[in-house]
Amino acid sequence: MKLLFVGTNPENTGAASHFVALVQAMAEAGHDVGVVAYPDGLIWQGLSTSRVRLTKAKFRNVFDLRGYAAVFAAARQLRPDWLVGNFGKEYWPLILAGRLLRVPVALFRHRTPPMKRLSAWLVPRLAQRFLAVSRHARQAYLDRGIPGRLVQVLYNPVNMELCRPDPQRRSEILRSLGLDEGAIVLGYSGRMHNGKGIFPLFEAASAAMAEQPRLHCLWLGDGPDAQALRERAAAHPLAARHHFLGWIADVHPYYSVMSMLAFPSIATETFGRVSIEAQAAGVPVLGSDIGGIPETLDAGVSGLLLPPGDVAAWRDAILALCDPSMRMPMGVAAHAFVQSHFSTGVIADEFVRILTTDR
């Protein structure tokens, strides 16, 4: 199958990470893949070493003729069976380009709530395939009256090889943090803002540290509330056991250090890529029972679902996973769960099925 992906968003977002992972999954599965991407953006950089055809473009808006010219040029070269888009600003340009090129269009939606009412009604009907990245995200469109047959679900793929535990990097990172091999590390990776539940997590982790002397918390990420969190941690008696590394371009090596990952959002999440990446590395997940997060783990087997913002419940769950007799089997189950549900081969096969089956 020939697929032309169009993603000219330069930002470092979950949608961009999904775009890169799906492109790589389809290329690895043997499909002929081309990409129209913003020059030197996250997508371009992420695919620069992949075996895909890259075309530079910027789509500023639906009237940007240079964006259309780049898509048409790439389409003439590849002669794709499908155009695939991932970002809202490109929905209408791709629908129009698909009509002009007589190529069907598949569009992904990563956010809830849905688009403005008119677009939310038209886009799933005009695109030949409209895909949400979770059942939770799909329901938002069904709630708007969109027929279920028009909205399908395709989860984020995960490259299992990238998430493979690396004992050498683990030792190097532990040494850089001043920790020994016996440390129990609770990890957080994501945007630092209140809706992500970072403040209740801090309180829960600190309370658990008071009972478990080997427990440390590793904070990866940045955002509007990062400084407030750092200040709160600095004033805490256990400040030395909270480790803030800021924004990390490639978090994969840090999964090797984590004993467990926390996904503590108190605001609704559409999905949760960090959850499945951690589990791919054999790290059990503590996740908020909200939005699309429950779809990312096998509750009670590969991790635990917890009430959002409930400090006592999170403290108890963190302490429970400090016990290796509980944590280690969950880590093994986590890897197997992701392998069977989210690995690149599984998602590539499902995408082909969706594209080739009448809706």
Image: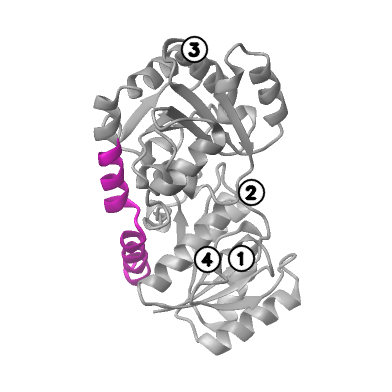
Residue flagged by tag 2: what amino acid is it? Lys
Residue 30, quarter of picture: bottom left
Q: Badge 4 is on which residue?
A: 126
The reply to whether callout 4 and callout 3 are in contact (CB within 8 Å) is: no
Alpha-carbon span between mark 3 and mark 2: 43 Å
| Local secondary structure at mark 2 | loop
The residue lying at 74 percent from left, 77 percent from top is: 66
Q: Which is more N-terminal, label 3 or label 4? A: 4
Give the x, y percent position of residue 231: 71, 21
Quadrant location of the N terminus? bottom left
Q: In x, y percent, where is residue 315?
A: 43, 16
Q: What kind of residue is marked 4?
A: Leu
Residue that label 3 marks = 207
Helix, strand or loop under label 1: helix
Residue 45 badge: 1
Please give the label number shown on residue 116: 2
Q: Which amino acid does label 1 sit on?
A: Gln
Q: Point out the image quarter for the C terminus.
A: bottom left
**Mark closer to the observer (3, 2):** 3
Residue reaching furthest bottom?
Answer: 77
Image position of 353 with respect to 14: above or below: below
Predominant secondary structure, magenta span: helix
Going from the N terminus, do you reach mark 4 or mark 1 first? 1
